[in-house]
Amino acid sequence: MNARSLSFRLVAWYAGVLTGVFVLLGLLTFLFLRHSLEANLLDTQARRARQIAGTLVAQARRETEATLRNQVEQLYSPEVNDRFIRISRADGHVVYASGRPRSGLFEPAHVPAISGDFLKGAARKVPLAGGSLLIAAVPATGGDGTLYRVEVGTSAASAEDTLAQVLAMLAVGLPVAVAVAVAGGFILVRQALEPVERMAVKAQEITQHNLSERLPVVHSGDELERLAISLNHMISRLEDALRGSKQLVADASHELRTPLTVMRGELEGLAQDGRLARETREALGSVLEEVERLAEIVESLFSLSRLDAGEADAWQRFDLAELAATTAEQMSLLATDKNIRVQCESMPGVTVRGDRARLKQVIVNLLDNAIKYTPRGGQVTLRVRSDGAHAVLDVSDTGIGIPAEALPHVFKRFFRVDESRSREQGGAGLGLSIVKSICAAHGAEVEVLSTPGAGSTFRVRQPLAAESAGPG
């Protein structure tokens, strides 16, 4: 997972959590506001009901209930003020009931009576056709001891209008707030992960050929800076270890060349000595073959050590097609012994820049590999062409092919697809490793396509030489 996808996932997670928090906060705010508005309205109605009960109902008697009705009408004018007022006795008789309010928000006749203990107060919200009604009820005692219940209510329309406005504000404000917060979070996450992206890109560029390079360090004083420093220290230790390993291989290869040359000379002389028995000469010949193979391995290791060290002759511009044609002609002599036809199909004018001798070694190794593993009577085809900004070199054969499970490993050092067959044919498993190293030094890519029993194709893609680049 790269830094870009990680930043998107972090922002998505942040946006989801933030949206959930904002929605929960908006819901709680809405519920609290609704409860607060309704509680305030009910408290106002309860105070008005107690006022009626304490001033008017407390002085009323059954024979003066008509006066009570007139006083309520004169003092409170419920229809004009959009209020609901109802006064009833304990036996259920309604002493006074207000009429339809001027606004027409509710119908008083549709308000049901309160059930429960008559002597207890009550507060309720009654849903009606025109809207909800908030009603507070309090008990009262008349001048003659008669029990009354005073109900005072008002429409919840004002509270509901306020809540609707709040909902509209939340519906508009929450998405805007989330969008602003997510945009700010995305910017912050990108800024925080940008150093990680640079480190990841640089880490992908570092190979065994450029271990001297280091990851960029952001001097922020946080864990990211310490991580970059720790990784750079690790790369330094790897560089030292790899340099020591390469130096060991180079020194060992160099030191082994002289004794192997001496051994080969001595064995050749002894093998030609007619005084020795035939069995002895055959044994010496077998030993000489193994020494020759060992000398070839040492030379290959020495070449790899030089490539790993970056040693190369002066680079120059040259025609890759011409080099391929001359090399194929030279290698055709080796193929003639196995009755294998080497065909070269080159597009002229495919100019590249590099070490001519090293690139010739690539062609030689690929052709030699193809000839070794192609049965008698087969064919090896060498093609050179240009493809966009790259030169493409293909070496195809009609040989035994390579199993699919072995394809990822063919360029590893000392890897052999068939151990016994490779030893019989003198292969040490280093030829393709040398090809890979030379290609890497030239900024080229090498790949293999193969079908068991149908042959293989090794393809090298190298950048074409720039027109303005001169030799060397």
Image: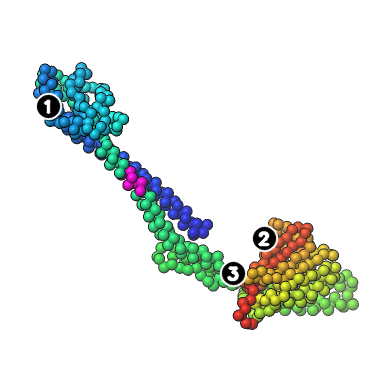
Q: Is residue 129 left or right of residue 149?
A: right
- Which quadrant does the C terminus fall into? bottom right
Q: Identify the amino acid type marked 2.
A: Pro
Cα gap from disc 2 to disc 3, whole angstroms: 19 Å
Which label sits in the foreground, 2 or 1? Answer: 1
Give the vertical position of 335 relative to 105 (above or below): below
Using the image, tell me which numbered label, if any, was put on residue 408.
2
Between residue 288 and residue 167, name the one nearer to us.
167
Q: Which residue is mark 1?
A: 71
Nearer mark to the viewer, of 2 and 3: 2
- Residue 321 magenta-highlighted: no
| Majority secondary structure of magenta residues | helix
Mark number displayed over residue 208: 3
Amino acid at circle 1: Gln
Q: Is residue 245 above or below residue 407?
A: below
Q: Is residue 258 among what the camera can see?
A: yes
Which residue is rendered at x = 79% and y = 70% of the image? 343
